[in-house]
Amino acid sequence: MIPGAMNGFTNRRHLLQAGAAAGALGFLSKVPLVGAEEAKLDPEFVQFRPEIEPLVRLLEETSRDKVLEEVAARIASGTTYREVLAALLLAGVRNIQPRPVGFKFHAVLVVNSAHLAAQNSPDSDRWLPIFWALDQFKSSQARDVKEGNWTMASVDEKAVPAADKARATFEAAMDRWDVAKADAAVAGLARTGGAQQLFDVFARYGARDFRDIGHKAIYVSNSWRTLQNIGWRHAEPVLRSLAYALLEHGGKNPADNDYEADRPGRKNEELLKTIRGGWQSGEVKKEATTEMLAVLREGSWEDASVKVVELLNKKVSPQSIWDAIFQHSTEMLMRKPGIVTLHACTTTNAMHYAHGHTFNDETRRFLLLQNASFLTMFRQRGGVKEGVSIDQFDPAGGAPGLEEVFAEVSGNKMKAAQKALAHLRAAKNPKPFIDEAQRLIYLKGTGSHDYKFSSAVLEDYYSISPVMRDRFLAASTSWLQGSKKADSGLVARTRAALT
């Protein structure tokens, strides 16, 4: 177990009492002065880089009912979007226990989703998703305090391996599910390894087991994407949190046991070796997608893996398999809307992102096989039975406008999907639909899943074959926000703070 922080629940009181000197950075010029003793940093807790530490502590120490206004004041004084995004991620990493990988930890998992929503927002609304995420952090921080007040401790520097041994030590620790050794090794790896090298390693471990309904894979991709925006210099604490999250298992050591959650990964490590060379080239075939979709609907995880290998070895393009995976994840949500089926969609988004951004060919094959296997496990865990088929439901309503479609989203979800399909076919331009769907999320969304799902599905629209895109996007109404729902109270508060 990691000394101090990762294995225990250290008390945050001393850290919160330690205030940053007001004049340390320009954007903190309005913070009240504090004494020298108060300003000392507690060496027990992990500290961030000096340029971001004061802003992180501002987020930690400011009460939930004042944090939006305080951050708005810093923005008016010159604090940048990137600085706020970095502080938001790091505050969550230091203050929120990443086990289980979900629940209150969504405050960290959702940072990239809020960022994507902000990027897709008009200039006038760009801060709304980020301020929603700030409020989400304060809510999760309070919950963490009630559950034991966990805080990430500083690294055990004596255990950090030399640069030439860091990767091997880390992989050995991850294979043995050894938390203490993994924590020290990942610190060394973060200091000496490149971003791409580390992503290749984490992408594999994030997809190796079906625990926490896909949140491990989601954390890998979302944390990496956020680091691309805030800078690799902030990577070490994020990767320590990530490694600790990936080693969550809730039972006896998986290295010494045969749990269902680990079986697909172990089997697929062998199956990937039977895939032909040059597998990434092939023919896109609709009938292959249909075959794959049928197996995902009814087969086991083993059936799904075998079908993937069979199709690839018949020189079918991986795109045809991804088309089936995207369709089935959203189809399950249509058949039985709920948290489990929603995570089939967001996990697919994360694993597809990792598949497209790792340089390691074996890891790419592994991610494709694991995603197919996981969907059958999502289906079983979510209790998904027969129902609407995403490749067959009919459009309805003639050529309804966006207003009519999103009004229906607030009522009958199936009718909304049918009207959305009719609208998209008539409009022949998905952007207004996507823009409106995103706008309604940050105006009316209240939970982390609203942001995670919308950012995932609206991005994945461009990853599925064009002939299937309208149906895929129409099916997303199963978890989008409708126009008849009242705006979130945070919207007015954010706008007032920034005015």
Image (spheres, rainbow, N blue to C red):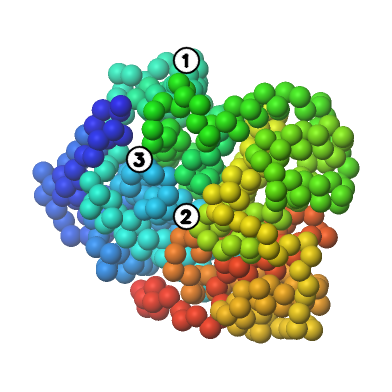
Amino acid type, label 3: Arg
Q: Quadrant of the N terminus?
A: top left
Task: Tell me if residue 370 comes above or below residue 473 in the rendering.
Answer: above
| Quarter of the image that includes the C terminus | bottom left
Q: Disc 3 versus disc 1: distance between alpha carbons? A: 25 Å
395 versus 110 height, above or below? below
Quarter of image, res 186: top left
Q: Earlier in the sequence, mark 3 or mark 1?
A: 3
Which residue is tagged 2?
110
- The picture places residue 182, in percent across and down from the top left corner, at 41, 25
Kind of residue at badge 1: Lys
- Residues at marks 3 and 2, CA–CA distance in whole angstroms: 23 Å
Is residue 66 visible in this depiction of the protein?
A: yes
Q: Nearer the viewer, mark 3 or mark 2?
A: 2
| Image disc number at residue 341 | none
Residue under label 3: 49
Residue 253 placement: quadrant: top left
> Which of the numbered marks, if any, corresponds to residue 165?
1
Which residue occupies 39% across, 28% down? 252
User: What amino acid does circle 2 point to?
Assistant: Val
Residue 224 in view of the camera: no
Q: Nearer the viewer, mark 2 or mark 1?
A: 2
